[in-house]
Amino acid sequence: MSAIILFTGGARSGKSRCAERYAAQLSEQVVYLATATAGDDEMRDRITRHRARRPLTWRTIEASLNVAAPLADLPAGTVVLLDCLSLLLSNLLLAYESDPEPAINRELDHLLAIVSQRDLTLIVVTNEVGMGIVPAYPLGRQYRDLLGLANQRVAAAATAVYLVVCGIPVELRALEAAWNRVAQ
């Protein structure tokens, strides 16, 4: 049975480490789907640190766009860690700057369909960017809005959603259920 687990939080909140620990509990053979590109020294260092943390039994697939394509041939039951949706969305926004929303929707449609069809467990890491200062420039506001919508869409499909604060994951589905009982 397919499953989606979402880890969200602010920058340096510990969400990737939490997602990695979660994945390691599910399987020794994780497929790590990396969306980052090494465009500068700081990002190269970050990628190096992430690689060093991964167990040697994990397979890494680097895909800055079209992340669902490499998942199409994975066997049923494979655990996939997508790190991260935020960078994927940024890559799509820059690749389709004149009209990114259809490309983002196609990417999410394809990803969610493949997970369901292939019976995969998909663990998604994403940033929560809507809790801070409103970006001063239009592209930043567009990114914030599109990522917020993408996060909502993935969360709606997810069986578990964790907000990571200070390295501590807080499971949100239980809070949502309590809210729904009170709000009725």
Image (cartoon, grey):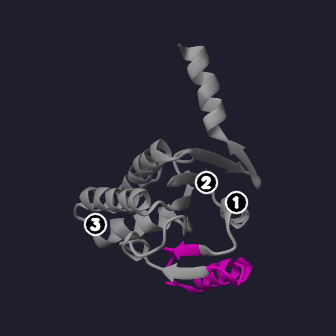
**Part of the protein shown in magenta:** 31-58
Give the residue type that dot 3 points to: Glu
Between residue 118 and residue 180, name the one nearer to us.
118
Image coords of residue 69 (percent x, y): 36, 74
Give the residue type that dot 2 points to: Phe
Describe the element under mark 1 as helix, strand or loop.
helix
Q: Which numbered disc flags the more N-terminal residue, 1 or 3?
A: 1
Tell me how far mark 1 sits from mark 3, CA to CA. Answer: 34 Å
**Disc number at residue 62?**
none
Circle 3 sits on which residue?
97
Describe the element under mark 3 as helix, strand or loop.
loop
Q: Which of the 4 quarters of the picture holds residue 167?
A: bottom right
**Magenta span contains residue 41:** yes
Image coords of residue 115 (percent x, y): 44, 60
Between residue 153 and residue 31, name the one nearer to us.
31
Image coords of residue 177 (percent x, y): 60, 27
**Disc number at residue 7?**
2
Circle 1 sits on which residue?
22
Tell me how far mark 2 sits from mark 3, CA to CA. Answer: 27 Å
Q: Which numbered disc flags the more N-terminal residue, 2 or 3?
A: 2
Q: Which of the 4 quarters of the picture holds residue 124?
A: bottom right
Q: How many residues crowd mark 1 within 10 Å: few (<14), some (14–19), many (20+)? A: some
- In this image, 35 relative to 45: left or right? left
Point 28% across, 56% down: residue: 101
Of the residues tagged 1 and 3, which is closer to the observer? 1
User: CB atoms at circles 1 and 3 under 8 Å apart?
Assistant: no
